[in-house]
Image (tube, rainbow, N blue to C red):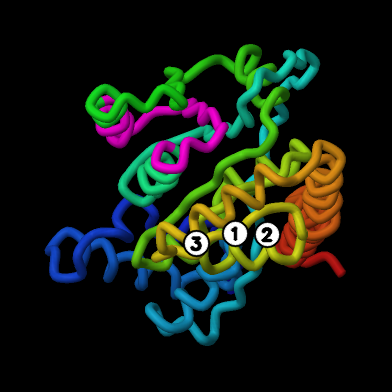
């Protein structure tokens, strides 16, 4: 009898590859063989559990959700706001992170929103090119910054922007950026579906746009965001924090993990 725990983000590195791609098919088959050897699999988002069952046909392998831990960020410096609503996006900017339609809407309607992009990825070059081409003065692109500088920037944010739009199981999962915003007690403007959309609706701490949203839909959510008072945004941020602590804080699962590992250790040693 072999007891194994395996925590995985379910092939994030190649999940977006075309199914006919040889590399994907090789890794996919290897993954299925690997997963069948485990008695318990911890996944980073509920949608991966359905992926295990529907795609890998792992009906006899128990799985549970263990959300990724969120690293603490200092928030002790708060700068005064100017006339713009401060919207902050942090992390990777790639093809699955819808930002351009939101920026275009801000520019087309001259909305008083300043969007800060703090991160990296292939999408940064595209944003810089469009900013120069279209004269997007309300876009601020920051290179990746150390946590001691990121903290003050997030602290002065009126809201966080979280987007994820991929036509695969990854697009259904819970973005780490959303967990971070929840923990930092910030309201969220989101372009999400799946697990992320569900949890934001449950927390009642933001404004949600679904992938495929029209320009009118995007503008409506941006206007709703601008119309909220500081007191309302503080309440939404607190809602997110409370929801995170109750439903999403991975630390609450650690006792269960430790109990199972302790039980396994005793079974190996033949202890009762």
Q: Residue at x 27, y 30 (%)?
A: 134
Q: Which mark identifies residue 29?
A: none
Q: CA distance from mark 3 to mark 2?
A: 17 Å
Q: Are the residues flagged by discs 3 and 2 in contact, CB closer than 8 Å?
A: no
71 lies left or right of 259: left
Mark 3 lies on residue = 217
Q: Are the residues flagged by discs 2 and 1 in contact, CB closer than 8 Å?
A: yes
- Residue 61 or 80: which is nearer the viewer? 80
The region drawn magenta spans: 107-128
Q: Quadrant of the N terminus?
A: bottom right
Residue 214 x %, y %: 41, 63
Q: Residue at x 80, y 16 (%)?
A: 76
Q: What kind of element bears circle 2?
A: helix
Instruction: Return the disc, 1 or 3, that comes first in the chain's sequence.
Output: 1
Mark 1 lies on residue = 208
Mark 2 lies on residue = 200
Q: Quadrant of residue 87?
A: top right
Q: Is residue 69 visible?
A: no
Q: What kind of element bears circle 1?
A: strand
């Amino acid at each position: 009898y072999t007891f194994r725990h395996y925590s995985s983000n379910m092939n994030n590195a190649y999940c977006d590859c075309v199914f006919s791609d040889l590399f994907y098919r090789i890794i996919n088959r290897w993954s299925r063989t690997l997963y069948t050897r485990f008695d318990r699999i911890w996944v980073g988002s509920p949608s991966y559990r359905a992926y295990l069952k529907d795609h890998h046909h792992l009906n006899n392998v128990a799985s549970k959700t263990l959300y990724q831990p969120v690293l603490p960020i200092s928030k002790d410096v708060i700068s005064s706001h100017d006339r713009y609503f401060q919207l902050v996006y942090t992390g990777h900017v790639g093809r699955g992170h819808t930002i351009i339609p939101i920026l275009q809407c801000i520019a087309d309607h001259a909305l008083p929103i300043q969007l800060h992009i703090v991160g990296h990825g292939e999408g940064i070059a595209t944003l810089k090119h469009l900013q120069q081409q279209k004269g997007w003065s309300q876009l601020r692109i920051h290179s990746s910054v150390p946590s001691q500088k990121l903290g003050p920037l997030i602290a002065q944010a009126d809201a966080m922007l979280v987007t994820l739009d991929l036509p695969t199981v990854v697009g259904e999962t819970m973005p780490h950026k959303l967990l971070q915003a929840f923990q930092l007690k910030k309201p969220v403007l989101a372009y999400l579906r799946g697990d992320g959309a569900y949890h934001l609706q449950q927390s009642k701490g933001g404004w949600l746009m679904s992938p495929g949203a029209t320009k009118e839909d995007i503008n409506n959510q941006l206007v709703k965001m601008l119309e909220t008072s500081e007191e309302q945004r503080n309440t939404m941020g607190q809602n997110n924090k409370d929801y995170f602590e109750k439903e999403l804080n991975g630390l609450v699962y650690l006792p269960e993990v430790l109990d199972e590992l302790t039980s396994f250790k005793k079974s190996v040693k033949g202890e009762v």
